Amino acid sequence: QKLILENQSLSETITSLSTRLDQKILEAETYSNNYLAVIRSTSWKITAPLRSVIHRLKFVRLFLSTGIGIIRERGLMSICLNVVKGLRQSGLKGFIRTLNLRINGADNKIEDEYQKWIKNYDDFSKDRKTAIQAACQDLEKRPLISVLVPCYNPEIDFFCKAIDSVMGQVYENWELCIADDCSTSPKVRETLEAYIKKDQRIKVVFREKNGHISECSNSALELARGEYTALLDHDDVLHPEALFWVARQINDTPDAGLIYTDEDKLDETGIRNTPHFKPDFNYELFLSQNYICHLGVYKTSVIKELQGFRKGFEGAQDWDLALRVMEACGPAKIHHIPRILYHWRISKHSTANGIQAKPYAEKAQLNSLMDHLDRSGSYTSRPSIEKTHFGFKVNFLVPALRPLISIIIPTKNKCSLLENCINSILEKTTYNRYEILIIDNGSDEDRTLDYLAALTASHANIVVLRDEREFNFSALNNMAVRSAKGEYLLFLNNDITIITSQWLEEMVSLACRPGVGAVGAKLFYPDDTVQHAGVILGIGGVAGHIFKGLHKSDPGYFNRAFLRQELSCVTAACLLVKKEVFRHVGGFDEKNLAVAFNDVDLCLKIRQKGYRNIWTPYAEFYHHESASRGYEDNPEKQARFSKEVIFMMEKWKDGLTCDPFFNPNLSLEVENYVLAFPPRTPGLKRIQKQETGKEIVPLPDERKKKILEHLNLDGIGIEIGPSHNPVVPKKEGYHVEIMDHMSREGLIEKYKDHHLNLDNIEPVDFIWQKQSYTELTGKKKYYDWIIASHLIEHTPDLIGFLNECDTILKDDAVISLVIPDKRYCFDHFRPLTGISRIIDSHFEKNTIHSAGIMAEYFLNVVSKGDRIAWHEGEGGEYKFIHTLANASDSIDAVKNKKEYIDVHSWCFVPHSFRLIIHDLYHLGLIPFRELSFHPTEGTEFFVSLSRKGEGIKTGRMELIRKIQLELQEFEVFES
């Protein structure tokens, strides 16, 4: 009977497979017909020149390595249609430029948003220049910086732009040291002689014999007298602020041996593209690619002691120099400025256009790395190095006496998951010294129990440990470590299966290196998209996986999904660590982190002890994430998760938003490389003089830029109070009308004793006296924008206010709000406003503040050091502003006299306001969504709203975690 049933099952399987085969044959015929249609089509003929260009640019190798995966993912027809669409939209030249960007490392999302980002955050205005000039004068030390430029027959136009970019530096204590490598063009000498006459800071040496870039650079170095030396190619451009930020870094870290910055590229039309936002110094990544590159600034004494650039390393002379400087100074003296301060020109002779532009460079790069490893002297056997399509791979060796590895796998029931995991280890692992410790957390299914018994009976290196306590990932693994015999511990989830047979050799070879702590791997979902390529701090409030959802064939942002690198954290779904290191940091925190973030906490403790955590893409696995335990999808799990979030935020604080391996110009909103709007780089207002602590005043235009960011200033807008300090004064030419609660004369009387410039108060066009906005203005759907600075917190009916704005705004209009952050003003001790009070106030149709709000306001508002608003970190004693009698009088005024008294009805921190707007929109109570958000600067934050806004990009739970982080240092209570 059993055989009959099995035969019937096999017959059904064969029938099913036969049907699927017929379907695939039909699909293949369809694809074949589609292919013939494509190659015979007009569009295919149109793209023939493009295919020729691609061939000439030598992209074929890259296409072969990634093309099959992309075609499988997206389909041939889809790709062809996108080619035609791109040609129609951009023309042949524009499409080729875009294609070139994609292949050379630009991420689509970043590239698409970069021009907007430049406009918002990197616009070098006249006011900006004035502020930087003031900041230059405020520097305690103003070191001389020598800019080295080796040149040989440069294109004169580009060469002049390179020199002009140095002459245009706001920081003026520089010298330009140019060495001409015996150029054959007479225009080069003519140009240089003209520049020498223009500025005595320009020094030139004309070499009598061509010696290539290393010797030429050394000739320029001989001219250098500066404390630091910056490298500039003869056709590239420095950002006007570049040397200021370098000088500031030298002030902050006077022992720096090497300073590097972020960079982007310039196409031949001068358009900036392909921004490279780099991590802080990352040795593992630096062995994979020369990501430091431009702008590199070196301590002059160090590079002269090293005898400058080495002949024979042309094409990689800067990488070779950086490696030698790193050896001489140590990684601690390498500092990163997270700003785009260098524009690398894309030309046919530049490696900005790909390594194929200088074919000798690849050999020089390989030799630079090999020499560095030889000089390191820490390897018993010399590692080999191989060139991949995306960088270099150093093949570190496993010790001859292979250490024993203890593979620790927690499990409960779900036998098929564990069976697949164990089978993949036994069948695919080539490393032969390991034991497997399975922690059975209370399995009660017969199949699982039978399987575990069979495993231990048939494999001497497999042990089953029992622990029937409530699931606690940290406790289970800590318990297993006490029984582990291995020198190294490999924590592995039971829903993991192996792809790379030499996975353990790869991970062990890294973990055995001096100073290495945890080693993580590359995990994929079953659909071949990335589940884990490292953990970034701050994503989602605590930490998140980078490159999540990226296709297996996609190298990611600057190929980083395919390159080994140091990271702050890796997931314990597959984590290797030396047992000695694990014990040194106290293992997993089983008391506070039973389920979530225990691996993040472990990795941070490891880094805190001075070890480096490494992620490798060369150990690949499939991860059926949460298949064993499920998701955080019930109230009990969510409550536990929130508790763990709060614990991590309280323990690691600001460290969760300052990941050294994730650039502050990149967003923490999503698990991928996306531009941050705004970036988290410190603004000018945070530049302080070391001795006096004198603070530079924030740029007025920086504040205004945030407010005006999305406004159509060619249209007409309305600014709704307070009119004593208008953002867009009429006298400056803005097309604006003013709305306030009293006339100009009344406002002058109101503010006459407030030490304000009363001349700033402009005539009020509309005096609001509780009528509708359409009735007040006589207009409907008329205005292009509204500015409301420090207003929305005063409105008794916040929802009603926004809906009134809707009646007078065009469909594509924008509301720009400036809102006080309760943490840094007199609202400090007042409770955070929740959505319930806002909704209740709206349906009660409040036009004055309620008695409860009045009492709560007068009871709790404070000053700090006699200030009613203050910057983060400013000291002073808190004092109540009002008395109990004031609070009693306010209740009487509202309850009996029905008076409007102007107070803050609502109290927000940035993410609480964002959450309220999100929820009000989705509840159908307002028509607006968030268009943009800028975090607190000084005492206020900035939010723009629009009907066409995309809203928040993170989930509600992540916003709530961020609110908890914002409030963690502040006492919040209901009075």
Image (spheres, helix red, strand yellow):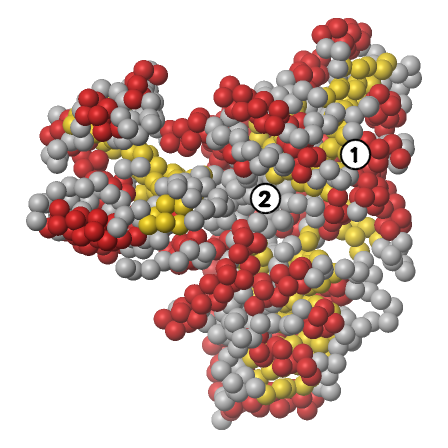
Q: Amino acid at mark 2?
A: Asn
Helix, strand or loop for disc 1:
strand
- Judging depth in this view, the residue of 445 and 755 nearest the camera is 755
**One can see residue 226 in this view:** yes
**How many residues crowd around disc 2 within 10 Å: few (fewer than 14), some, or many (20 or more)?**
many
Q: Nearer the viewer, residue 915 or 460?
A: 915
Q: Specify the quadrant that holds the C terminus.
A: bottom left
- The crowding category of the residue bearing disc 1, from other C-alpha atoms within 10 Å (few below 14, some 14 to 19, many at least 20), is many
Q: Which element carries disc 2, helix, strand or loop? A: loop
Q: Is residue 6 in sight in this rendering?
A: no
Q: Position of residue 87 (x, y in %)?
A: 50, 29
Q: Residue at x 84, y 53 (%)?
A: 384
Asked whether disc 1 touches disc 2, contact meaning CB atoms under 8 Å apart, the reply is: no
Q: Is residue 302 left or right of residue 728?
A: right
Judge from the rendering whether residue 729 lies leftward or rightward of residue 871; answer left or right: left
CA distance for labels 1 and 2: 24 Å
Q: Nearer the viewer, mark 1 or mark 2?
A: 1
| Mark with earlier residue (1, 2) | 1
Residue matched to label 1: 299
Q: Is residue 777 left or right of residue 276?
A: left
Vertical side of 312 occupied by 71: above or below: below
Extreme left residue here?
896
Q: Name the one closer to the observer, 864 or 133.
A: 864
Does 879 sit above or below residue 581? above
Q: Which mark is residue 663?
A: 2
- Residue at 24% of width from left, 56% of height from top? 836
Residue at 45% x, 56% y: name it.
969
* Amino acid under disc 1: Lys
Rendering coords of residue 713 (x, y %): 34, 22
Whether 438 is drawn above or below 690: the answer is below
